[in-house]
């Protein structure tokens, strides 16, 4: 049975003091929930966050990683480095990594395989641009992103994959896909996975929605049958907002 998940992507926000303070507040206010709760501080604060949340129900995850085990890759972080400090889950393919840092489907395929080879959990992000949505090409774009990065994987690793659909036009813009639009795409994603692999994998993979989820719309979005939670951006930086979103699941 697939998991309900609420994950906070903090992006390039919060210094060490701010990270500690937000984690203290989240820990104190965390509701009794069956959903998995995850937060992803910046790389420089991951180790301290893991130590601070030891014994907590909140999992600390990474925002990115390189596909190589080691080497001359200035500024990059490997899977082994993350595992060494207690990080077991990594976000890969976020739209900002694709747009600002040139991460292609081919690069992401290598990253996904590298993480899975180390028995990490991968939260794989994908989604269409505004022009794709307006032209009616959004289903083709999403299917292509999934196919290019994930369809060569063995069926056995899908228990270590979380999917995060993020319509790029609804990230940080204040725009949000309607609950019906989110459900339509999530159902399409599940159908696509079933066709490529099998229905069991499709039924058991968690698919998160990542597009300007807020306390005011979380419950309605999360109520849709194929939406298993959210990858939260800006609202994850405010403890009360993030807690309200968790309560919405």
Image (cartoon, grey):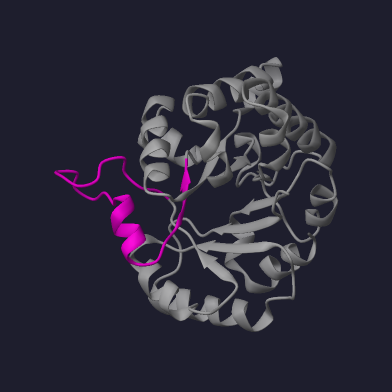
Residue 54 at x, y = what percent?
48, 78
Placement of 243 over or under 103, stated as above or below: below
**First to last magenta residue range:** 64-92
Q: Residue at x 23, y 50 (%)?
A: 75
Residue 125 at x, y = what percent?
55, 39
In this rendering, would 236 be left or right of 219? left
Any magenta on residue 69? Answer: yes
Q: Is residue 88 visible?
A: yes
Q: Residue at x 62, y 64 (%)?
A: 37
Total numbered labels placed on residues in the image: 0
Q: Residue at x 81, y 58 (%)?
A: 216
Placement of 234 over or under 146, stated as above or below: below
Any magenta on residue 71? Answer: yes
Residue 154 at x, y = what percent?
50, 30
Q: Residue at x 41, y 33 (%)?
A: 108
Q: Quadrant of residue 165?
A: top right
């Amino acid at each position: 049975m697939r998991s309900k998940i609420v994950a906070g992507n903090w992006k390039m926000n919060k210094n060490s003091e701010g990270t500690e303070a937000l984690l203290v507040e989240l820990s104190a206010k965390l509701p009794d929930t069956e959903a998995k709760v995850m937060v992803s501080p910046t790389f420089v604060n991951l180790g301290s966050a893991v130590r601070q949340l030891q014994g907590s129900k909140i999992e600390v995850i990474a925002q990115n990683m390189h596909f190589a085990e080691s080497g001359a890759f200035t500024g990059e972080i490997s899977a082994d480095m993350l595992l060494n400090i207690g990080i077991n889950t990594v976000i890969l393919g976020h739209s900002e990594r694709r747009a600002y840092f040139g991460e292609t489907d081919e690069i992401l395929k290598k990253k996904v395989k590298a993480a899975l080879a180390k028995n990490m959990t991968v939260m794989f992000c994908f989604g269409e641009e505004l022009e794709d949505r307006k032209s009616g090409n959004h289903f083709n774009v999403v299917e292509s992103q999934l196919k290019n990065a994930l369809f060569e994987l063995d069926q056995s690793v899908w228990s270590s994959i979380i999917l995060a659909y993020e319509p790029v036009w609804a990230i940080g813009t204040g725009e949000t896909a309607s609950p019906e639009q989110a459900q339509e795409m999530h159902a399409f994603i599940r159908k696509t996975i079933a066709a490529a692999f099998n229905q069991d994998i499709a039924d058991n993979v968690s698919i998160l929605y990542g597009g300007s989820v807020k306390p005011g719309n979380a419950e309605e979005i999360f109520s849709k049958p194929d939406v298993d939670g959210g990858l939260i951006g800006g609202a994850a930086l405010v403890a009360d907002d993030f807690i309200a979103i968790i309560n919405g699941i």
